[in-house]
């Protein structure tokens, strides 16, 4: 394809949302001239399913749930007035609560005002807020934000070490829809202990975002936490950033959540159009289908050329992979769908893995995210007539060309800046693209049975650990092998799991388990002393 042909293709297929200063360029995707026309019947069905979803139809048949994250930025579209009121009231409550915190009307136990925010959550309860916090942070932040987003003790110690005595000025927001998510429960308990060790009462610094009547809701009410905010069963974790899950920490940080909601709402309007080229979410979904032949045969590489969007790839990993990674389709047929997502930031990617992207296995398509605005104010010249931002654009265009020369496909998404409005629009774009693609390949994008299976498996390991520690206490004087202990507790087929649990216990002080014998698993002996 000549440069002139590429330019003409660029103009023909460019999808633009003028009100957002947004454009989507798919000219470097190698779809055939008749591809969009061939896909029209499938896309029309996807549009109809999306329209029904937004009107309140059951869109998650496995859990018999509606899917309403689009109502979060357009509550007037919710199918019942009560839902509209819930959304509107929650946004107003978020504003009011944050205002009381910022004005010092709501104070910590032993300090004049809150200056820090600790968010405790995992998965969708953390990734969306993390993306927003990192993308929009500034020196004007009202509260500085930290996260417990894992059940890693050392990770939590690092965060607490950074907070130090400022924990006394820290508001903690615990986010869990069910209240039963163990990673979040663990983070809550670790945070509570840290407050107690500083002579503070956790409830005077704690806020919950959770489902009504959940374990967390009951606990927060019983302990007298400062406030609870709702999570609804019609909002999935990975699409919850426009609910209190994302809006509360963002507003506490001092960000413009009204602009986030407005950007998402504008993108929703644009992505309801039934003309594929005028609908960037539909065009994205079609390109994903083209790239992977509707079977996810190629990975999605996200390359944001802006430091503030570094976490975009992590956010999209969950949104795309948890939504689309499904064993069965809606008819129960095994299809093993999904699209793997990874990414870095430009031009760091140039020095990380572009070498393989250009010359290695062609098992991907790239998405370049271009941000037109370099910084607030003017930039210095690093050489005559050239700024650092000019170099960033040069590396992006150069990398894109280098990939195209080798037949590697790419999409380019252009936004004017990294603002609350733009971040809202980007999240809405990908939420809609995921929903439309799921319809194209006939899967349920709104459940996550694999996640639940992993949680059940983890629970079984912890039950095994309880049996092991009980057995070790019974045989206190006897050093026994993993195989002997597996037999002792009646689980001879779980020798490897038994060994890994014992190895972990022995490596950590205070657990009471000692390891002796040789270095190999079969030679190792364990006992309690």
Image (tube, rainbow, N blue to C red):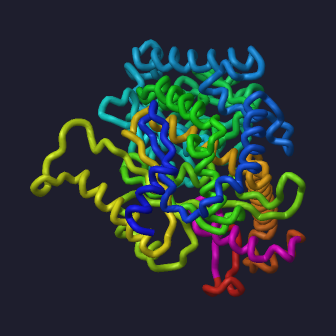
Residue drawn at x 66%, y 68% is: 297
Q: Position of residue 99 (x, y in %)?
A: 45, 16
Q: Position of residue 36 (x, y in %)?
A: 65, 54
Residue at the far left: name it.
Answer: 384
Question: Would you say 412 lies left or right of 30 here?
Answer: left
Q: Position of residue 56 (x, y in %)?
A: 79, 29
Residue at the far top: name it.
Answer: 105
Question: Would you say 386 lies left or right of 475 here?
Answer: left
Question: Would you say 369 lies left or right of 376 here?
Answer: right
Q: In the rendered image of this protein, does residue 473 appear above or below residue 11? A: below
Q: In the rendered image of this protein, does residue 298 appear above or below residue 235? A: below
Q: Quadrant of the N terminus?
A: bottom left
The magenta-colored residue range is 491-516
Q: Quadrant of the C terminus?
A: bottom right
Residue drawn at x 65%, y 63% is: 512
Q: Nearer the viewer, residue 297 or 211?
A: 297
Residue 200 seen in this snapshot = no
Q: Nearer the viewer, residue 59 or 246?
A: 59
**Residue 485 part of the magenta-drawn span:** no
């Amino acid at each position: 394809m000549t440069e002139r042909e590429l330019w003409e293709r660029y103009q023909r297929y460019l999808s633009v949302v003028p009100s957002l200063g947004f454009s989507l360029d798919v000219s470097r995707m190698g779809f055939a001239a008749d591809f969009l026309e061939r896909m029209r019947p499938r896309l029309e069905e996807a549009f109809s399913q999306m329209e029904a979803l937004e009107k309140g139809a059951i869109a998650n048949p496995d859990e018999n749930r509606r899917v309403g994250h689009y109502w979060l930025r357009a509550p007037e579209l919710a199918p019942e007035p009560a839902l509209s009121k819930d959304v509107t009231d929650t946004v107003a409550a978020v504003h009011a609560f944050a205002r009381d915190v910022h004005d010092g009307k709501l104070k910590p136990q032993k300090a004049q005002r809150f200056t820090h925010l600790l968010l405790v959550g995992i998965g969708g309860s953390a990734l969306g807020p993390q993306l927003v916090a990192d993308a929009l942070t500034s020196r004007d932040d009202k509260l500085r934000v930290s996260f417990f987003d894992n059940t890693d003790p050392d990770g939590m110690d690092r965060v607490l070490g950074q907070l130090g005595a400022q924990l006394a000025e820290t508001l903690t927001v615990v986010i869990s829809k069910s209240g039963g998510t163990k990673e979040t429960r663990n983070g809550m308990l670790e945070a509570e202990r840290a407050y107690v060790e500083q002579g503070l009462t956790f409830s005077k610094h704690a806020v919950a975002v959770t489902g009504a009547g959940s374990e967390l809701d009951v606990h927060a009410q019983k302990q007298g936490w400062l406030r609870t905010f709702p999570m609804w069963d019609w909002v999935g974790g990975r699409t919850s950033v426009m609910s209190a899950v994302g809006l509360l920490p963002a507003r506490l940080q001092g960000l413009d959540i009204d602009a986030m909601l407005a950007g998402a709402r504008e993108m929703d309007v644009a992505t309801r159009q039934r003309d594929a080229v005028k609908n960037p979410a539909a065009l994205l979904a079609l390109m994903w289908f083209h790239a992977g032949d509707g079977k996810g045969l190629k990975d999605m590489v996200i390359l944001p050329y802006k430091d503030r969007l570094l976490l975009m790839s992590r956010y999209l990993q969950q949104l795309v992979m948890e939504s689309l990674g499904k064993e069965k389709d809606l008819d129960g047929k095994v299809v093993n769908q999904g699209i793997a997502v990874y990414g870095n930031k430009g031009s760091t990617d140039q020095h990380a893995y572009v070498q393989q992207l250009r010359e290695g296995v062609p098992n991907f398509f790239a998405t370049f995210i271009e941000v037109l605005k370099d910084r607030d104010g003017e930039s210095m010249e690093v050489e005559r007539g050239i700024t650092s931002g000019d170099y960033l654009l040069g590396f992006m265009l150069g990398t894109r060309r280098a990939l195209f020369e080798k037949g590697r496909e790419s999409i380019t998404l252009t936004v004017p800046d990294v603002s609350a409005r733009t971040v809202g629009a980007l999240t809405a774009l990908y939420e809609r693209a995921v929903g439309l693609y799921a319809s194209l390949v006939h899967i349920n994008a709104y459940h996550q049975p694999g996640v639940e299976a992993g949680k059940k498996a983890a629970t079984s390991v912890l039950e095994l650990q309880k049996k092991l520690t009980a057995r070790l206490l019974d045989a206190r004087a006897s050093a026994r092998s993993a195989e002997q202990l597996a037999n002792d507790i009646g689980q001879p087929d779980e020798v490897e799991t038994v060994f890994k649990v014992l190895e972990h216990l022995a490596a950590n002080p205070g657990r009471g388990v000692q390891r002796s014998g040789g270095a190999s698993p079969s030679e190792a002996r364990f006992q309690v002393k």
